[in-house]
Image (spheres, helix red, strand yellow):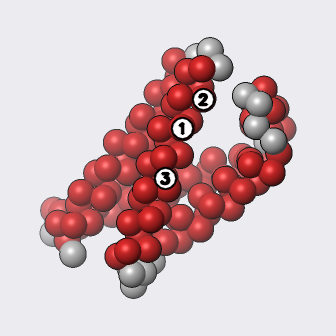
Amino acid sequence: MKNKIIYWTATGLISLMMLFSAFAYFTDPNVSAGFTAMGFKDFFRIELGIAKILGVFVLLIPSTHKLVKEWAYAGFGITFISAFIAHSANGDPVSAMIMPIVALVFLATSRIFLSKIS
């Protein structure tokens, strides 16, 4: 029971973080400007927002095949590491660099406890 609580808490937190960031990607002009300032084209922001929403569905639907979940975990992991690198290279504040690392910790916790409850 403890493992399920840890899994669903970590998975719920990472899912909320991804949904909030995807929403911001589509609605917040400051986020759009941030992507542009880092040299990314606008299509990348939209593509990443859609991918985050799809990844959340994959993580939250229990009947999703485990291999598909593995791809979602990998995709999110690559996204968080890339976000850390992009914010670091862009000279953004430490707070912008910490959030992808926090997300990576929640993601790793979710993945570790998925294997414990499966």
* Residue corresponding to mark 3: 76
Q: Residue at x 53, y 71 (%)?
A: 57
Q: Amino acid at mark 3?
A: Phe
Please provide percent x and percent y for residue 53: 61, 63
**Residue 30 lies in what quarter of the image?**
top right
Secondary structure at badge 3 equals: helix
Residue 64 higher or lower than 88, as above or below: below
Answer yes or no: is residue 42 visible.
yes
Which residue is disc 2 drawn over?
A: 86
Q: Residue 27 in the image: x percent, y percent? A: 80, 48
Q: Residue at x 48, y 47 (%)?
A: 78
Question: Which element type, helix, strand or loop, lies under badge 2?
Answer: helix
Q: Is residue 42 left or right of residue 91?
A: right
Could you say which is closer to the camera, residue 95 or residue 39? 39
CA gap between label 3 and label 1 equals 10 Å
Determine the residue positioned at 16% across, 62% down. 2
**Residue 70 placement: quadrant:** bottom left
Mark positioned earlier in the residue sequence (3 or 1): 3
Compared with 35, 64 (above or below) is: below
| Gap in angstroms between the C-alphas marked 1 and 2 | 6 Å
- In the image, taking residue 59 as reference, residue 28 lies left or right, namely right
Q: Left or right: 104 with respect to 84? A: left
- As measured in the structure, the alpha-carbon distance from the residue carrying label 2 to the one carrying label 3 is 15 Å
- Please determine whether, in this image, residue 67 is positioned above or below residue 83: below
Point out residue 118 in the picture as x, y percentages from the top left corner.
Answer: 21, 75
